Image (spheres, helix red, strand yellow):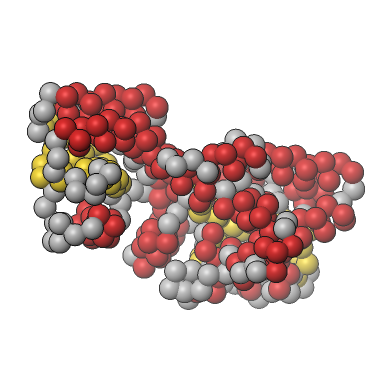
């Protein structure tokens, strides 16, 4: 927790991302104080409930399964790991119990590849809980974008002091940016562009174009810029604003990949892997997918444009989906009980596989029927 707090306290863009990623862990640490606990929000109380469920689960497990649970918790608090996978597990189990299922934590108790076994009216289903980062479907990774911005920001401050004004650096990255080497290379190209006072640098991996910043109300306070920039460049653009100390000069960076994000396709790839590797085929399989590292706008767009539904239903026609009777999808918003329009109706998206033999099972219906 000390390491997480150190990273989240940083004034860098990467620090703000760490604050978001480790919000659950930081909340639990803060809520350990009685004063904070008394003022806990409904979302924070849900976090406490998940932690409580995990403790109660540990108390019911024999020694070996309890060690497996402890190992999961330790992994969740190491490096970039989070408690999301564990809380997704206990949340999925709680929802199943509320729908009338008996729930066994088979993965912990028996070391099965699947996580939960649901039974109702003599019928059973295997549940796999998978956590998928939206980064897997982004051509420009947010973590790498943050690293680039943090590296170039001091240089931009110095450059703005010598070149007062309002600037926009538009970057098109045909091959995306997902490695440290790509970050370093792009950093070098931006530095050279500024040092040589060039307006454009075009290459196979990146096209850079530096222009005056022209937006409606661009002479207003810089705090209004992010919303205007987002409206102009769209939800998939990566944006950064560097302002001079006096607030009069501004340098904006806007980057887009050469292709649209494919978060839904990335989720389906993981569905296929999980279905093949983690379901036995002896019972109908349910994939409970947690999409992490999403912001509210992305999650709403995935639902409203039916991208996730379309990709999932296409995958259900493939041989790799033969063991799967249904797929459910949630984000942190549903985990924390956030209501629509930001959170999904019914607390999840759920899609039934009509070609599975158990698709019409009345016993399993509460867990497999498609959501509205």
| Image quarter of residue 152 | top left
Q: Residue at x 46, y 47 (%)?
A: 16
96 relative position to 160: left or right: right
Q: Residue at x 28, y 44 (%)?
A: 245
Residue 364: image x %, image y %? Answer: 66, 70
| Residue 272 can be seen, yes or no | no
Residue 38: image x %, image y %? Answer: 70, 69
Q: Residue at x 19, y 45 (%)?
A: 249
Q: Nearer the viewer, residue 74 or 223?
A: 223
| Residue 166 can be seen, yes or no | yes
Which part of the image, by quadrant, shows the N terminus?
top right
Residue 192: image x %, image y %? Answer: 19, 23
228 relative position to 124: left or right: left
Residue 341 vertical position relative to residue 163 in the rendered view, above or below: below
Residue 89: image x %, image y %? Answer: 67, 55
Q: Residue at x 15, y 46 (%)?
A: 166
């Amino acid at each position: 927790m000390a390491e997480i707090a150190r990273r989240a306290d940083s004034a860098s863009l990467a620090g703000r991302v760490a604050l978001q990623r480790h919000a659950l862990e930081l909340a639990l640490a803060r809520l350990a104080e009685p004063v904070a606990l008394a003022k806990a929000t409904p979302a924070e109380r849900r976090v406490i409930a998940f932690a409580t469920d995990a403790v109660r689960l540990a108390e019911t497990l024999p020694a070996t399964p309890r060690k497996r649970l402890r190992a999961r918790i330790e992994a969740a608090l190491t490096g970039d790991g989070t408690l999301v996978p564990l809380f997704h597990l206990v949340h999925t189990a709680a929802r199943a119990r509320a729908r009338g299922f008996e729930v066994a934590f088979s993965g912990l108790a028996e070391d099965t590849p699947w996580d939960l076994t649901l039974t109702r009216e003599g019928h059973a289903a295997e549940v796999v809980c998978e956590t998928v980062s939206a980064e897997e479907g982004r051509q420009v990774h947010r973590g790498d974008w943050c690293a680039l911005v943090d590296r170039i920001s001091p240089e931009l401050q110095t450059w703005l002091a010598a070149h007062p004004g309002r600037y926009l650096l538009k970057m098109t990255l045909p091959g995306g940016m997902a490695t440290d080497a790509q970050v370093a290379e792009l950093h070098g190209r931006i530095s050279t562009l500024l040092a040589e006072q060039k307006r454009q640098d075009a290459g196979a991996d990146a096209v850079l174009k530096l222009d005056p910043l022209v937006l409606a109300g661009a002479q207003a306070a810089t705090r209004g810029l992010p919303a205007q920039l987002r409206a102009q460049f769209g939800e998939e653009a990566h944006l950064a604003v560097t302002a001079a100390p006096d607030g009069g000069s501004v340098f904006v960076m806007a980057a887009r990949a050469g292709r649209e994000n494919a978060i839904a396709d990335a989720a389906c790839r993981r569905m296929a892997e999980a279905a093949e590797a983690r379901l036995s085929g002896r019972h109908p399989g349910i994939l409970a997918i947690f999409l992490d590292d999403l912001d509210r706008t992305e999650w709403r767009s995935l639902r409203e444009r039916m991208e996730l539904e379309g990709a999932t239903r296409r995958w259900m026609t493939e041989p790799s989906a033969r063991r799967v009777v249904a797929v459910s999808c949630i984000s942190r918003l549903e985990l924390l009980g956030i209501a629509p329009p930001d959170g999904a109706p019914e607390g999840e998206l759920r899609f039934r596989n009509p070609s599975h033999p158990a698709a019409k099972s009345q016993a399993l219906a509460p867990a497999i029927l498609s959501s509205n």
